[in-house]
DNA sequence: AATGAATGAGTATTCATTCAT
DNA sequence: GATGAATGAATACTCATTCAT
């Protein structure tokens, strides 16, 4: 469950005089560095290094470390939104759709710890980069609509109860999955049980699937 | 929901030549500073300032910034464990006990955002301070036993189903509450709904109480 | 015989944007500072100041105080080796060659007290910078070969005896000259005779020339 | 040939309320620390620690780090002077007396590297502690008189030539021995020959004995 | 578009020394 | 005499950022 990234400058060659590629490789490097060390811990030098660019180029393309962080954050969000858009819940029966949503959340976070780190970091800093209208618009999620539609279908067929707020449901599912990975290291240490093992994750999945489906079921 | 702490040196007088008090005031200042800015962002200068001590005293008493961070983390954990110990779940009927547990979790995190920040930060850093046997022992939680006992009582009286893992239940509850506050800023920004309002919290409480109790109920 | 260097920042202008010159001026400043105060006593600030650079440039070019010290030490050695290489002993009759060697040693140390200081300091510290193969190779001295060849020529013409180890001869000559200047201050103070006066040096020269030549003569 | 001293606080108990002993144990500790690390490198904390005293006592008894250094230097000198006083050269035939002197110098320095370090350090610093009349008087050496008397006896019996300055002879002998040990580490490293081995020392001894005796012999 | 050189303001840490008891 | 607590002034080193080419 370690998230440490060794600071190998990974100097794979990058073609000269290709602005688009240069910008892109800086952004990729930035995402890795920020995800691994946070805004404060990340080093512009390392980012430039990893991107096989020089420090000045970082400023040329992004203006400041902070702006670069924001760009990295936006890309990270964009990525997850793109995946969410592919999550075709409407073709599945409501209960299966909900399970699919949980699995997606669990799998994505398990495989993209960097998203956790960036999200935690941004909030710890007071979320200064997310505030502002453009950001919210850019990262506008289709998920809430998907959930709402699924809940309605479930209610219609009698498998879900009414009165469930899609955002609250989303937050509770995201919370259960996010927390598991976000705080897995301290949880494992303090409770003496390795939560990063595949079986532990599978078992926990069963637990939250049951909790959610039962919680959604009509009385 | 802002967690920023203005860097006012808050120079309230501190009696001289009182080692116990000096040490303590440094630790208090450290907890505030670390909670607000994280390990990387915190400034030893600020801590000393806030404690009305000088920087060297910090080193005199704690040795290093890192050791001070660990001490702050331990105290933070100790505090929550002390509260958990007071949580007398065994005198309540199982379902009420579970609600009590959720309320405690929600209220504590709502009122102690600094705990969230320290926990997130420690995990982001790879939990280097929590690893190691002494820490786990020191912060050994009574909560798992309380939950296990409650689950058993609930099963005995027929309100809870069997086969529920106390740790998994704890993680899911903690996740739902922790995530709400930990990532509240970005959630509010992106979904355009202020989650820090009291009514929003109350509504979310109802949601997770329902989810949990229904999830625990026998089929 | 004073070696103290006043800490005048000696801000003689240095052309901007000239990396070669910048690096070089830092190294020059470092040699002065290290020679005057030793590794421990030297201040990076002072070095930067004297080089009309700022502190960070020192790190930009040399990485650390220690690495800078090593670079200064290497240059110091390189300089003396370059001079030794010019010492054309092979064109002189053996006895004159030996006198030439003594004179060179005496004159060089007299005029380059900084070499004495750096050598003493390095040894006092346990010679950590000199250890390692590259250093030895870089500073490989031609002197031993020169001495060996001179001894052979002297033996051939009957002025020197056989069985003399070049390294031991070198060490004894270097010892007599080095110690005179290295410890001149305490010697002068304790024995109440100023050894830094030109006549004192001249007289001592006669003494060691005689000692050496007689010591080398066949029985 | 290493002179590094591990910083074990060597906390052997020391009887309380015994001023003489306290002062003495501080001085002993100071000599070890200064000899190992020099004036700049030595730490008052370490000295106090090693002496099982507290830092304030160091100041109580010696006033300052510098004064303590001077006291340590004086004791070091006093010790060698005491040994020199026991060197009964006058009972030996002149040539044997001279050999005895060389052996003494070689052996003492070999066994007391700390003397080398302190002497080098003091000179490197510009000998500020040795300057001043009291120091010279306190450490007044009998050696020059012993050498002068030996030279006279040698001249009288025809084994030594005339015109030899006792101080110059002393400096040359001390130089050959001192330099060997003082700079042994760099010499060994650069010339690739371990000068600290007993055989190497024995061989060098023969060399300087021969050099000296031949140099003193009449033409 | 790209680069290496240069900079100011910080940042944890150290250390000799003094104060109060 | 002896001790722990307290302090100011340094000190090596870092880092985001800008300049000049």
Image: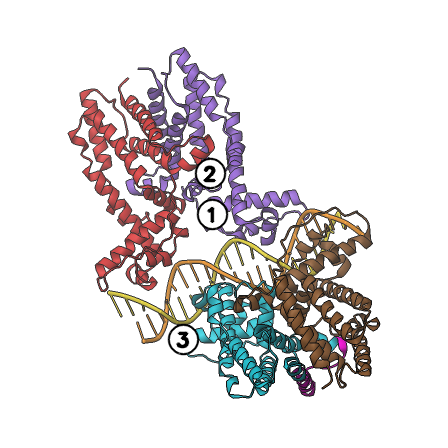
Chain colours: A red, B purple, C cyan, D brown, E yellow, F orange
In the picture of the structure, the residue carrying the numbered disc 1 is B39
Q: Same chain for marks 3 and 2?
A: no
Q: Nearer the viewer, residue C115 or B16?
A: C115
In the picture of the structure, the residue carrying the numbered disc 3 is C20
Instruction: Point out the frontmost of discs 3 and 2.
Output: 3
**Magenta span contains residue C210:** no
In the picture of the structure, the residue carrying the numbered disc 2 is B115
Check the image and report above or below for B35 versus A62.
above
Instruction: Point out the frontmost of discs 2 and 1.
Output: 1
Q: CA distance from mark 2 to mark 1?
A: 13 Å
Q: Residue at x 47, y 17 (%)?
A: B92
Q: Residue at x 77, y 58 (%)?
A: D61
Q: Nearer the viewer, residue C103 or B145?
A: C103
Q: Chain of mark 1?
A: B
Residue C199 appears in which quarter of the rendering?
bottom right
The span shown in magenta is C190-208
- The residue lying furthest to the right in this view is D91
Q: Residues within 10 Å of mark 1 (few under 14, many from 20)?
A: many
E16 displayed left or right of C147: right
Residue A59: x %, y % from top left = 32, 61
Residue B19: x %, y % from top left = 66, 45
Prevailing secondary structure class for the magenta stretch in the rendered image? helix
Secondary element at tag 1: helix
Residue A159 appears in which quarter of the rendering?
top left
**Magenta span contains residue C191:** yes
Q: CA distance from mark 3 to mark 2?
A: 53 Å
Residue B211 appears in which quarter of the rendering?
top left
């Amino acid at each position: 469950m370690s998230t440490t990234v060794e600071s190998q400058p990974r100097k794979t060659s990058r073609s000269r005089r290709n602005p688009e590629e240069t910008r892109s490789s800086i952004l990729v490097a930035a995402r890795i560095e920020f995800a691994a060390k946070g805004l404060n811990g990340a080093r512009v030098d390392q980012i430039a290094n990893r991107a096989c660019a020089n420090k000045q180029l970082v400023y040329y393309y992004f203006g400041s470390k902070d702006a670069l962080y924001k760009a990295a954050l936006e890309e990270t969000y964009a990525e997850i939104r793109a995946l969410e858009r592919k999550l075709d819940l409407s073709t599945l029966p409501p209960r299966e759709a909900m399970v699919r949503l949980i699995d997606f959340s669990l799998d994505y976070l398990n495989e993209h710890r960097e998203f956790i780190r960036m999200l935690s970091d941004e909030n710890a800093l007071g979320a200064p980069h997310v505030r502002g209208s453009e950001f919210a618009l850019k990262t506008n999620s289709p998920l809430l609509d998907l959930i709402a539609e699924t809940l309605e279908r479930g209610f219609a067929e009698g498998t879900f109860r009414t009165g469930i707020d899609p955002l609250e449901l989303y937050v509770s599912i995201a919370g259960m999955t996010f927390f598991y990975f976000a705080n897995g290291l301290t949880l494992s240490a303090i409770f003496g049980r390795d939560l990063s093992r595949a079986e532990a994750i599978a078992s926990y999945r069963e637990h939250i699937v049951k909790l959610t489906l039962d919680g959604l079921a009509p009385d």
